[in-house]
Image (spheres, helix red, strand yellow):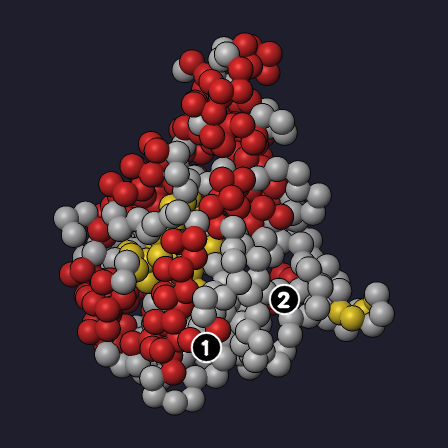
Amino acid sequence: MGIYDYQWSRRKFLGSVAGTGALMALNPYLSWALENEDPKVAAIVAKTMGIDTHNHVDVPLNAAELPGPKADLASELKKSGLSAICATFAVDYQKLVNPGDAYNRFITGLDAMDIMLKDNGMKRALNMADLTAAKKAKQPIVIQSVEGCHFLEGDAGRVQVAYDRGLRHLGLLHDNDASVPLGDVYTNDPKYGGLTKLGADTIAECNRLGIVIDLAHASNDTIDMAFKVSKTPMFISHTGLSTQLGANPFMAKMMRPRLISPEQAKKVADAGGVIGVWTHLADTPAEFAKNMRAMVNAAGIEHVCIGTDTKITAPYRSPNDKWGGPGGSGGDKKPEGQPKEGDKPQGKPEGDKKDGGKPQGGPGGKRVGERTNEAWADQKTGFYYAVVDALLKEKFTEEEIGKIGGGNFCRVFNDATKGH
């Protein structure tokens, strides 16, 4: 396997190329990684397609706040070792009162992403060829996503607008129901019997245009019905297995409704889907690898991917935000009734206070696990490097890491976008 042989020592690896210039020519990620990484890990990172299928990039959603703060997206991605992220934002963190609010926020979010990508010399991947070319050129790239179809406001025809703006990954649902619902959300009381007509129409539009559908936040009934409707495989970008609750009882209780059972995971796999495992409920890379192993045992190695639900760039908070906590995509008020994954407290349950009476990990403080390259306490290396190292220690093979790292998602993404 040449430089990808796991058994090579660091000395042999460094001796195989002539100096820093050769290392940079091999892969620019290695110039950062070699100071901190086992070379076998760096080699796997360089070889495989690492994709985080659910990563929040906070952007302004109010036009008056454009262009928003500068964000070093390219550098953070290079540091992470990931080849690409599915860069998402959501428009329902502020109550949507007036007709057009959701659509205007969606368009503003895309405008803000346009600015950020231009500033970082990056572009969106529209198909698998774009991902492959970016990997070959050693350039980070994003797949544009939005979490929740609130912007449709009852009109599935607006999927065309999203497609024309470069969106290729559509999250059907989010925390709050759209003005015209698309299906039952897993953390809300069921009201719609699963997938609605608008939900089915939206899936049909995505099939027609070439957009991969993400069923995160969907109830089991919604998921089951969606797989019967879609002509291409779909996936669940960010969740965890219900048997892997971690060591924090408060977190386990809050996250339990957001997890998938082994039985449901198997149904998703049987339908050709892929399931993203998030970093939540794993306090270390080793625990994350064990959660990956559990999901693989439930769904199979061909049906698991990475979906951290973290933020690659610094949080952005709207100046009009009255809540004031760190985190929140696009700023604005935290939705009533439902905590958002990106805003989960860390450590002790709310009410168990210290440090001046503030809840541990609550509003006003930086939280472990919020940022992609700081997913775990005392993390010294980029995200994908840490994950590859942990997966190796969990006895996953290089081929299996390639599938989990991005290969499985790429299969579903290609099935949805090819020919478009």
Left or right of 124 in this view: 80: right
How far apart marks 2 and 1 lie (CA) works out to 21 Å
Residue 402, horizontal then vertical, whole percent: 40, 33
Which residue bears the numbered disc 1? Answer: 64
Left or right of 167 in this view: 17: right
Which residue bears the numbered disc 2? Answer: 326
User: Quick check: can you spot residue 396?
Assistant: no
Q: In which quarter of the image is residue 268?
A: bottom left
- Whether residue 101 is situated above or below residue 406 in the rendered picture: below
User: Quick check: can you spot residue 140?
Assistant: yes
- Whether residue 296 is situated above or below residue 206 in the rendered picture: above
Q: How crowded is mark 2: few (under 14 residues within 10 Å), some or many (20 or more)?
A: many
- Nearer to us in this view, 195 or 82: 82
Q: Do the residues labelled 2 and 1 touch (CB within 8 Å)?
A: no
Point 55% across, 35% down: residue:
385
The N terminus, quarter of image: top left
- Mark 2 or mark 1: name the one nearer the start of the chain: 1
